[in-house]
Amino acid sequence: MHPWKTHSRTVVLDSAPWLVIEKHVIELPNGKIIPDWTWVNTPDFINVVVEMADGSFQFFRQWKYGFDRISLAPIGGYIEPNEDPLTAAKRELMEEMGCEASEWVDLGCYRIDANRGAGMGSLFLARGARQVTAPSGGDLEEQTLIHLSRAEVLAALRSGEFRGIAWAANVALALLHSG
Amino acid sequence: MHPWKTHSRTVVLDSAPWLVIEKHVIELPNGKIIPDWTWVNTPDFINVVVEMADGSFQFFRQWKYGFDRISLAPIGGYIEPNEDPLTAAKRELMEEMGCEASEWVDLGCYRIDANRGAGMGSLFLARGARQVTAPSGGDLEEQTLIHLSRAEVLAALRSGEFRGIAWAANVALALLHSG
């Protein structure tokens, strides 16, 4: 099996850095040409499930514009230019919760849209986390911090309270790791 | 806490049905106006982890354009107009693998991009699956069918062989359910 070949790329919508849409001319392994494949560039991001030193898990309860009701959420943020995912994860843990962690588990880096790109999400589990300062984050959303036991996290995941797909992946992978 | 209000929507790129980009004028709970929030419409989709009647799991090994190497993948497909997610999942199981399942587990419906939309993914676990006919699927990708034990699925998930974030979510949620 061989990957598809990209013959050319044309930007058709530029809202950088948040969204850049391209059309690609693609050649399939059988030689067929697709003249107008849509490709989506959005920023890469990290998510972090935070397990505190006492074994509890710390999440936000927050709205996002894409939801029709409130959601539980792990830490999340875009990766800055020239920043590696783990550095971004540690920065966001400090900014959003004022915490440091003694152990970082890499839960993988995943393509958001297998067909059209839409960036990569790097997922982490931070263990042995402790609050060392006040949070400084200035996200647009109102949010409240909550603590859950492992059993409560699993129940919340199963009942659909983590409403973003990257968040569900992050939480499920963290539970599989720590289980 | 209150959700954000949408004052207006303007289409700025129309590649329907695959991609429609809108700009929204949004009001935050504190009254602040965001005049140009980017919103992405892409088709809703389903993914299905397939557990055969003998307890093995059946996946594809395939390229997608968004990957730099081959990936393991569950069944996936877009939901047709006026189709509900479970019906789409059963249709795709028949088309892509020629199988029926005796038990369907709903693993949830998730927003792909919490901020900008990008559709919803509905994830399922099909259990007690049996091959009843030959697959008829005509996806663009070359793909091969593989069987894995539960332990092999967990190992593949942990080593990053499921490269799409919806796929990782689907597999991790299925393993948590069946564990």
Image (cartoon, coloured by chain):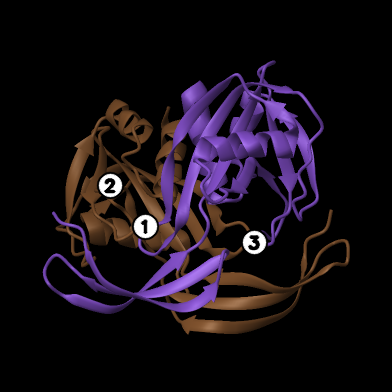
Chain colours: A purple, B brown
In the displayed structure, would residue B65 be above or below residue A15?
above
Q: Amino acid at mark 2?
A: Ser
Q: Chain of mark 3?
A: A
Q: Chain of mark 2?
A: B
Q: Which mark, residue A114?
A: 1
Tell which of A120 and B82 is nearer to you: A120
Q: Position of residue B77 (x, y in %)?
A: 36, 62
The alpha-carbon separation of the residues under discs 1 and 2 comes to 10 Å
Q: Amino acid at mark 3?
A: Gly
Q: Tell me if label 1 and label 2 are in contact, CB under 8 Å.
A: yes
Neighbour tally class for label 1: few under 14, some 14-19, many 20 plus, Cα within 10 Å? many
Mark 3 or mark 1: name the one nearer the start of the chain: 3
Q: Which residue is mark 2?
A: B71
Q: Which residue is mark 3?
A: A66
- The lab-note entry on whether marks 3 and 1 share a chain reads yes
Q: Chain of mark 1?
A: A
Q: Position of residue A117 (x, y in %)?
A: 41, 60
Task: Report the residue that reaches farthest toward the left.
Answer: A30
Q: Secondary structure at mark 1?
A: loop
In this picture, residue A70 sits left or right of residue B107: right
Q: Amino acid at mark 1?
A: Ala
The residue that appears at 80% across and 41% down in the rendered structure is: A144
Q: Which mark, residue A64?
A: none
Numbered disc in front, either 3 or 1: 1
